[in-house]
Image (cartoon, rainbow, N blue to C red):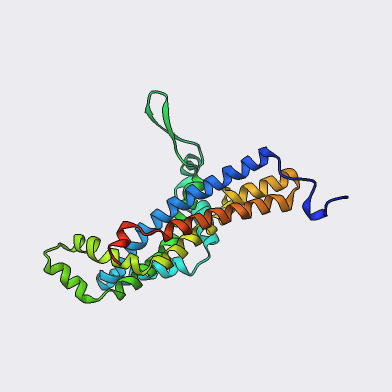
Amino acid sequence: MQPPVWLGHGWLPTKQLAVLFDGVLLTAMLSLAVCCMATVIGVMLALAVHYGARPLRWSVFSLIQLLRNTPLMVQLLIWYFAVPGLFGEEARIWLNTPHALSLTGSLALSWPSYEVLAALLALSLYGASFIAEEVRAGLSAIPRGQHEAARAMGLAPFPAFRCVILPQVLALIRRPLIGQYTAVIKNTSLTMAIGVAELSYRSRQVESETLLTFQAFAVATLLYLVVILAGQWLGRQREPVWRGAR
């Protein structure tokens, strides 16, 4: 009995499965780096809008709206194609040439390719614009008395924010923040447009080589699901910084 056409001619070879696992590894590493960078940048942007002087507030607010309301694909293309062009041909060649940082003896640290760096910057800024709004909403929800209590305890502004205000903000926005991190993982699939060999890129590569369309994308879908569910599970764990705020 012949298998249905949409099943192709068999299962994926082990070699092609390894290619997909390489892709999901890059997806997970890129997502983790983006989540960390986006959180730091997002908190800084939120602080600038919430506490900054009026010119700073409006400038940062305008930047957030620009990032939030333009397509991520366009931002990726700008970072990858347009930004290097601002620095001339030599800079573009240098950015697209593999580099390694020599540490000691034969030990060297490979520098990420420019497409990975462009993806990291674009995804981080895009994610930060959404995280900034979540953090700003959390800051607005904190009663003013909490700020006054921190000052009454003799805490300087930064320790007061880090030890008193920020834990409460994180507790309030934990679920929306997990949603933003989930969006980051899914948004990494767009980076295949600039040549990042993440999971979507690898699944398309496997499909082209084997013609096993259903199998390639079915495995990729399952791997995305595993990464996203694992990230959500980790995000739901009661971290120490949140536990003290509950």
Q: Residue at x 79, y 50 (%)?
A: 8
For the C terminus, the image quarter is bottom left
Residue at 31% over, 57% down:
240
As drawn, the residue found furthest toward the top would be 105
Q: Position of residue 94 (x, y in %)?
A: 47, 39
| Front residue (pair 19, 79) | 19
Residue displayed at 74% across by 48% down: 212
Horizontal side of 77 relative to 57 (left or right) equals right
Name the residue nearer the viewer: 148 or 3. 3
The image quarter containing residue 62 is bottom left
At a point 44% along the width and 63% down the height, the residue shown is: 178
Give coordinates of residue 187: x percent, y percent. 53, 59
Q: Where is residue 39 in the image (x, y as percent from the top left)?
A: 38, 59
Left or right: 208, with 61 as reference point: right
Give the left or right position of residue 20, taking residue 166 as reference.
right
Front residue (pair 20, 189): 20
Q: Position of residue 115 (x, y in %)?
A: 52, 47
Residue 102 location, quadrant: top left
